């Protein structure tokens, strides 16, 4: 039976967070200075959480943090440098974190970079940014997550995962011809598998994790694709796009729920073929425990 909630396609992040009390809890939102990251941070801060915007350009995000402090009345919003495409930056961020971490929203991402590019450590840029940087961040923050006694890790996948499973034998496109959307698809399948692996490996630490498709939202993410192709009636505002992230990060409805893939604030249907009508759903390979375990082991090797 699918896990469902009273919320849906049109729900906003603030509606999902209404009545939720996050006082005394600490949250990190990667990419919290832009797009749906801002609205995710806004809802968590409005609920009383201490929120860190983990961003590649801290200077640009400071004005966002100021606006959020004024809008929510929550002064406990800070900005810290995090470059997910450089594992050394991720390591520094994790090493500098103090105390427990109750909520980690792996939100930041890039999409469909036209040419094959590599991270500082030589990984394909979309895989390295969208998945591997977040894997490293989550892995290195495990002690802080465990100290929270019930931490939640939220990873943003995408309907783009339909375009490729994880290509284990050629993650860096050394042999397979690079395609922008194929590489994006691989990275987003990997993000979903991260939640499956955390569920299987860290349950004794009280850490739960779920993945989500936020929906079609016009943001800077589509700068290389010429904009959204989704029919207008199926598009969301940024406030609606952040709702499922906030649900998984903060709602008491999700207490103890882990290892699932959500869209429109409800668990997604499993599908066996890529939809052509924007109807949604999650491919089995993105939730397969064997794939999750293989990816975890491979990722640990990348961290050395």
Image: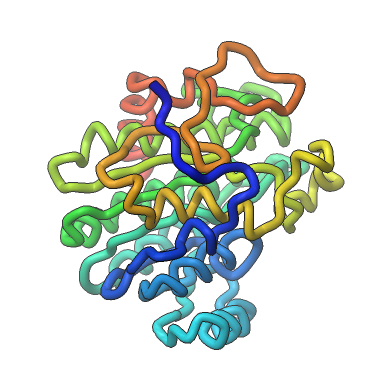
Left or right, 240 with reference to 96? right
Q: Residue at x 28, y 58 (%)?
A: 141
Q: In which quarter of the view is residue 142 placed?
A: bottom left
Q: Nearer the viewer, residue 41 or 144?
A: 41
Q: How many marks?
A: 0
Q: Is residue 40 above or below residue 8?
A: below
Image coordinates for residue 238, horizontal then vertical, percent: 67, 58
Q: Quadrant of the C terminus?
A: top left
User: Which residue is the extreme one toward the left?
Assistant: 204
Q: Residue at x 30, y 50 (%)?
A: 139
Image coordinates for residue 89, horizontal then vertical, percent: 43, 64
Image coordinates for residue 78, horizontal then vertical, percent: 44, 80
Q: Quadrant of the N terminus?
A: top left
User: Which residue is the extreme one toward the right?
Assistant: 226
Q: Nearer the viewer, residue 164 or 95?
A: 164
What colour scheme governs how the chains and residues are painted in the rendered image of this protein?
A: rainbow
Q: Residue at x 29, y 55 (%)?
A: 140
Q: Is residue 13 above or below residue 271?
A: below
Image coordinates for residue 164, horizontal then vertical, percent: 60, 24
Q: In which quarter of the view is residue 5 placed?
A: top left
Q: Residue at x 59, y 38 (%)?
A: 158
Left or right, 134 with reference to 281? left
Q: Is residue 162 visible?
A: yes
Left or right, 195 with reference to 281? left
Q: Is residue 157 visible?
A: no
């Amino acid at each position: 039976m699918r896990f469902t909630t009273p919320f849906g396609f049109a729900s906003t992040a603030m509606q999902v967070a209404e009545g939720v009390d996050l006082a005394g809890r600490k949250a990190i939102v990667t990419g919290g200075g832009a797009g749906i990251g801002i609205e995710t941070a806004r809802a968590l801060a409005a609920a009383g959480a201490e929120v860190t915007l983990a961003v590649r350009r801290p200077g640009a995000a400071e004005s966002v943090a100021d606006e959020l402090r004024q809008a929510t009345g929550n002064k406990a919003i800070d900005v810290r440098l995090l470059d997910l495409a450089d594992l050394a930056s991720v390591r520094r961020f994790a090493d500098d974190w103090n105390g427990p971490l109750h909520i980690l929203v792996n939100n930041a991402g890039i999409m469909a970079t036209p040419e094959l590019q590599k991270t500082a450590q030589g990984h394909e840029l979309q895989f390295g940014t969208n998945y591997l940087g977040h894997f490293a961040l989550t892995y290195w923050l495990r002690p802080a997550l465990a100290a929270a006694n019930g931490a939640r890790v939220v990873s943003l996948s995408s309907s783009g995962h339909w375009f490729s499973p994880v290509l284990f034998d050629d993650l860096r496109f050394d042999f397979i011809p690079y395609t922008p959307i194929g590489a994006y698809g691989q990275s987003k399948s990997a993000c979903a598998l991260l939640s499956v692996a955390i569920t299987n490996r860290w349950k004794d630490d009280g850490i739960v994790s779920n993945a989500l498709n936020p929906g079609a939202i016009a943001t800077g993410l589509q700068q290389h694709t010429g904009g959204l192709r989704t029919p207008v009636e199926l598009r969301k505002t940024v406030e609606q796009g952040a709702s499922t992230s906030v649900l998984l990060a903060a709602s008491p409805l999700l207490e103890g729920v882990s290892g699932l893939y959500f869209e429109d604030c409800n668990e997604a249907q499993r599908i066996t073929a890529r939809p052509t009508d924007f109807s949604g759903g999650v491919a089995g390979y993105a939730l397969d425990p064997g794939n999750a375990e293989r990816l975890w082991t491979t990722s640990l090797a990348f961290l050395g």
